[in-house]
Structure formats: structure tokens, C-alpha cells
Amino acid sequence: MELFKKISFLFFALSATVVFSQKIYRQELKLMGSRFAISVVASDSISGHKLIGTAINEIIRIEKKISSWDTNSETSKINRNAGVKPVKVSKELFNLLQRTMAISKLTDGAFDISYASMDQIWKFDGSMKIMPSKEKIKQSVAKVGFENILLNTEDQTVFLKLKGMKIGFGAIGKGYAADKAKKILIKKGVKGGVVNASGDMNTWGVQPNGNSWKVGITNPLNKNKIFAWFPLHNNAVVTSGNYEKYVIFNTKKYTHIIDPRTGYPSQGIVSVSVFASSAELADALATSIFVMGEDVGLNLINQLKGVDCVIVADDGTISSSKNIDINNK
């Protein structure tokens, strides 16, 4: 709830604007352990809220499939059989796993769904008084490594090589759910809307007055001022913050996003906004940039077609990929 309230962007929409008998109908609720806000353009309240209900049902379906907390989910079944045997999964989950593996390779392991195997040695609730030893940090990621996730395309199976290894979709699941909710609403004939999954946002169409949906990016170190507004045309944006949960040892700040390759917290960045064709991709890349750092992250984004980003460093400076000119926004 706090993250949803304080996430470093403001979403702009005139929810009561009426043009050609169309309005924006919006519902906010908790799903997948996060705050979702679903907005659709519809002709009346009954159809508007019915359509929102359709999106909610789709998000619930996704959660049941990918949740590692639900013992009946496919993900839980994969984790239970780590080091034991391959598990046959649905085509939908298999395809999602293939995409996560592709992103892991693209980011040299900065994004890795096997992060769920990591020992939770870092505490960001104020209880941590001393820094973990190098040995404990190294041991914490002993079972992490996307190369140990074996996908068999012919049999459509997943096998985690190491006993006790786990996968989790926390760094991509909300984005995927937002994409799927958008897809089903478009299929139902909704001409415009927004699915905002606690900072993972996907849009399509326009507002009833013909204006584009817009997102305002703020500097989390100066939240009272928006430094740029961006129109969204049938695309997604994910804004992630890394400035609320941290510990300080020897004047050095360690934040809550952990590098799955080393076990050490990411440093240097407090906010990342990624623009892409899907919230799933934007979500994964936002996490990756925190881990890779500003220079490496920008270099990666500048090589990807149709993807852009805005990064706020921990000293308050703002940088962006080559296709975004913040000064002209």
C-alpha cells in the first residue's frame, strides 16, 4: 500500500470527462499482494464495472498460476520437485519461462527468477545492526542461477537442477498480469484504458476527450515537482523505487534490490522508469537496471528497439536513454 501511494510517478486522467457518452470508470483494489488500479473507457457504469470485473478475474487467474505462495500453483509444483524431476506445465507458463530466460541471458543474469532461492540475510525493517559476512553473502546465492533452470521444449517441462532451488515471479508477475488484463479488455471491445499494477502500467487507446494517457515522472528525492510528462500511446511504463528500504553501514547505503549474482544490494540508483511495448518487459528491465547500474543499464536500453528509460541516481541527478530528451518535456 505504501509503495502504491509513494511510487515515483503520478498518473493523469480526467475520470469524469464525458465525450460522446463515454466515461472513464476506475476501481482500485489489492491483488497479487499489491495495489491495482484498473481504468476503462465505457458508455455506462454497469458495463464499465462489469469489464473491470473481467480484468480482475484474469489477474486472479494469473496469480493462481504463478504464485509461489499458492501450494496448488504450477510454480509451487516446480519448486517442490527441484532436484527431483522435471514438471510438465501449461503452454502459457512455459512461454513465460522462456521469455524470462531470454531476459536473463540479455542482462547477464542481472534479472533471474531463481532469485527466490536466495537466503534472506539482508533485513530492511530496522532490525539489522551488522553487515553480513562475505561468506554468508556468497552462500546466500549458492542456489541462484538461471542456467540451472532447464526447459524441455518437446516435453514442455521445467526442471530445477539443484535440490532446494526455487523460482519466483515477483520481479515480473505484476507486469505480466497487467499485460494479460489489457489483452482481455481489448478482446472485449474496450477502446481505451489503463491497468496500473502498483507501478507497472499498461495503456491502450485514448481518454474520452481524445487526449492521450499521460504519466508524470517525479524525482523521489523531490516528490513535489514533476520534471517530465510523457504521453502513452498503446504502451507500458514501469516505475520502480529503491529509496524507502535500505540499511547504512560505514556511511554506505545498501538498498533492498539484491544482485542475484553476488548477493550484494544494488547501489547508486533510487528510481527507474522503463517504457516498452509490454509491462512484463518493462518490469524485468527496470529491475535489471538497478542491478547493472546506470551506465551499463543505459547502454543496454539504448541497444533495444522500442525501449526507453529514465533513471534517477541517489545524488538526485537524472539521466535518460537516447530517445528521450527530458529538457524538452
Image (tube, rainbow, N blue to C red):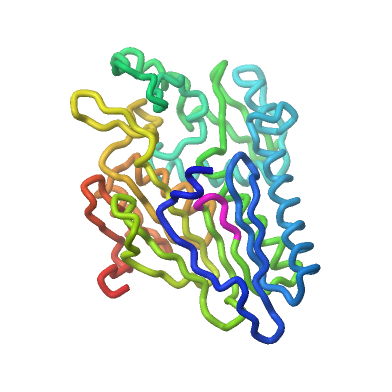
Please state the horizontal and vertical placement of residue 83, each as a whole percent of the image.
Answer: 60, 18
Instruction: Give the residue displayed 32% in from the left and 62% down from the top.
Output: 225
Please state the horizontal and vertical placement of residue 304, each as a whole percent of the image.
Answer: 39, 59
State the image quarter where residue 137 is shown: top left
Left/right placement of residue 211 relative to residue 248 reads: right
Instruction: Give the residue displayed 65% in from the left and 63% down from the top.
Output: 26
The foreground one among 304 and 57 is 57
Query: Does residue 196 lie above or below 168 as drawn?
Result: below
Please state the horizontal and vertical placement of residue 242, each as a whole percent of the image.
Answer: 37, 42
The foreground one among 178 and 99 is 178
Magenta span covers which residues? 195-199
The foreground one among 157 and 17 is 17
Residue 269 located within the stretch drawn in magenta: no
* Residue lying farthest to the left in this orientation: 251
Left/right placement of residue 244 relative to residue 232 reads: left
Left/right placement of residue 42 relative to residue 14 reads: right
Instruction: Give the residue displayed 54% in from the left and 19% down from the top.
Output: 162
What secondary structure characterizes most of the magenta part?
strand
Placement of the C terminus among the 4 image quadrants: bottom left
State the image quarter where residue 42 is shown: bottom right
Query: Does residue 77 lie above or below 201 as drawn?
Result: above
Placement of the N terminus among the 4 image quadrants: top right
Query: Does residue 21 lie above or below 235 as drawn?
Result: below
Instruction: Give the residue displayed 40% in from the left and 53% down from the top.
Output: 8
State the image quarter where residue 81 is shown: top right
Please state the horizontal and vertical placement of residue 210, each as a whole percent of the image.
Answer: 56, 83
